[in-house]
Image (cartoon, rainbow, N blue to C red):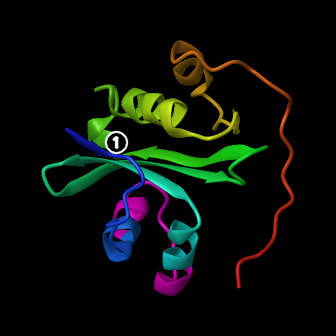
Amino acid sequence: MNYIVDDKNLDVSAFISFVNQIWPGNYDLERTRDALSRTLNITARDGEKLVGCLRILTDGYFFGTITELLVLPEYRRQGVGSSLLRLAREHTPTMLYFGSQPGVEAFYEKNGCQKGLPSYIITKKRK
């Protein structure tokens, strides 16, 4: 497995194909490109195949958040997510705050994350 911190060569089309295997949707190429340019992207690759990605959005000083930690289903429970989380911890300039999908809290606790404040969302329809 090859891990790349701040993957500047993350191909937008490959990312959309990857994400659609986990969160199927109709993702816009240019808006996805813009989103990826605003985050620190840590990727996991099996050869050339993108199998995992963790994205960090940060102001570089006060605040950072993990926008998502995604691993292809067939690569789960092989240490990929834990490695991505470890690299995030090592390379983030700030403390990280993030939410968890229900049912995966034990994964984060196993990886040394501490429960923090409850989170809230404000939903907005995509254009």
Residue 26 visible within the image? no
Mark 1 packing: few (<14 Cα in 10 Å), some, or many (20+)? few
Q: Is residue 104 left or right of residue 70?
A: right
Question: Residue at coordinates 62% horizontally, 24% vertically from top-left?
Answer: 105
Question: Residue at coordinates 82% horizontally, 63% vertically from top-left?
Answer: 123
Q: Quadrant of residue 2?
A: top left
Foreground: 67 or 64? 64
Identified by mark 1, the residue type is: Pro
In this picture, which residue range is highlighted in magenta? 17-31
Residue 81, above or below 111: below
Based on the picture, tell me whether residue 10 belongs to the magenta stretch.
Answer: no
Foreground: 73 or 112? 112
* Badge 1 element: helix
Based on the picture, tell me whether residue 24 belongs to the magenta stretch.
Answer: yes
To which residue does mark 1 refer?
A: 73
Q: Position of residue 116 (x, y in %)?
A: 80, 24
Q: Quadrant of residue 78?
A: top left
